[in-house]
Amino acid sequence: MAGRYAPSPSGDLHFGNLRTALLAWLYARHDGKRFLMRVEDIDEQRSSMESAQRQLEDLAMLGVDWDGDILYQSTRYEAYRAALGQLDTYECYCSRRDIQEASRAPHATSGMYPGTCRSLSDSERSTRRAELAAQNRHPAIRLRAEVDGFTFNDRLRGTVIGDVDDFILLRGGQEPGWAYNLAVVVDDAFQSIDQVVRGDDLLDSAARQAYLFQLLDAPVPEYIHVPLVLNTRGQRLAKRDGAVTLRDMLIDAPLPTVVSALASSLGYTDISTPGELLEVFDPTALTMEPFVFTDLTSDH
Ligand code: GLU
């Protein structure tokens, strides 16, 4: 059984990403689990091998070590195809605009697919498919969900009930692509992940994923959605916030200073290596407050 870190290789890791990676490593190592690395490179437009390489180098340099081989999602398309074949699905021809318009209807729950294509007749389907094909576009494939909510357990939040809709498994359009929610579940199951530590921006996806584990007869992992790092304006930290990537931070500060700032953001002082942090890490002490990043050496 194992924990994991699963970055999308679309840019260098910043202080917030590094903090989440460190937490995932700390929880797994504290609980005596293996810690696995997975490169989530299914989005071919935004991912690059160079970026994956730089992220992995950064994590290794920081001292976040992992076990076994790295799994690249771009090598897993057959497994996603096989999982798709096990699920009850339907084609969806909606554009983003169709969905926005349908979502304005009374009783629509925002962010939930309103089910427009769920019960089309065969002839309606062939018409819609032909219309899309004429524009050189493919339909999306959605899960025919049998529930509209699902309950899962999060170590920091307790029992959570989240929305489930007929979410996308294979994206349509001109370049069809595997959807994050399917890939993440198939791979967490494949890698025997039983502990998912990640940013709480993904909390809204967790019920859909937990439901998918159940449909695929795989055990649902324990979730630990950790608070994000924010900038001083209260927005999620991003690269435009200045010297926040590891490489940028290391221009002005030695590595132990970066580790010390990460540890300090978690409430620990006088720490300069992940090993020292692991010795004192208390998984029950993490607060739910987002951490506001000012600069590396300020006293947090
Ligand atoms: N690849 C996702 C990201 O970088 C994380 C997915 C996950 O941890 O479930 O945001």
Image: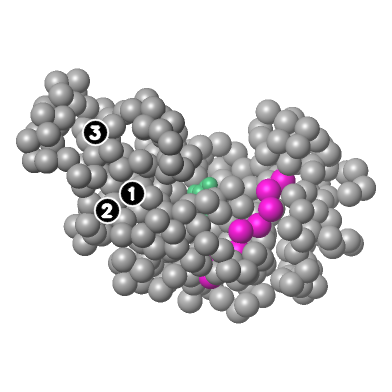
Q: CA distance from mark 1 to mark 3?
A: 13 Å
Amino acid on which the number 1 mark rests in the picture = Asp
Q: Between marks 3 and 2, how big is the CA–CA gap?
A: 15 Å
Badge 2, how many Cα within 10 Å: few under 14, some, many 20+?
some
Precedes in sequence: disc 1 or disc 3: 3
Q: Are marks 1 and 3 in contact (CB under 8 Å)?
A: no
* Stretch in magenta: 222-229
Q: Secondary structure at mark 1?
A: loop
Question: Is 258 placed left or right of 52 in the picture?
Answer: right
Tell me residue 181's x, y (percent). Answer: 40, 51
Q: Position of residue 273 (x, y in %)?
A: 77, 62
Q: Which residue is mark 3?
A: 93
Task: Please name the residue that numbered disc 1 is placed on.
Answer: 166
Tell which of 66 and 16 is nearer to you.
16
Q: Which residue is mark 2?
A: 144
Mostly what secondary structure, the magenta segment?
strand
User: Residue 97, relative to residue 164: is it above or below?
Assistant: above
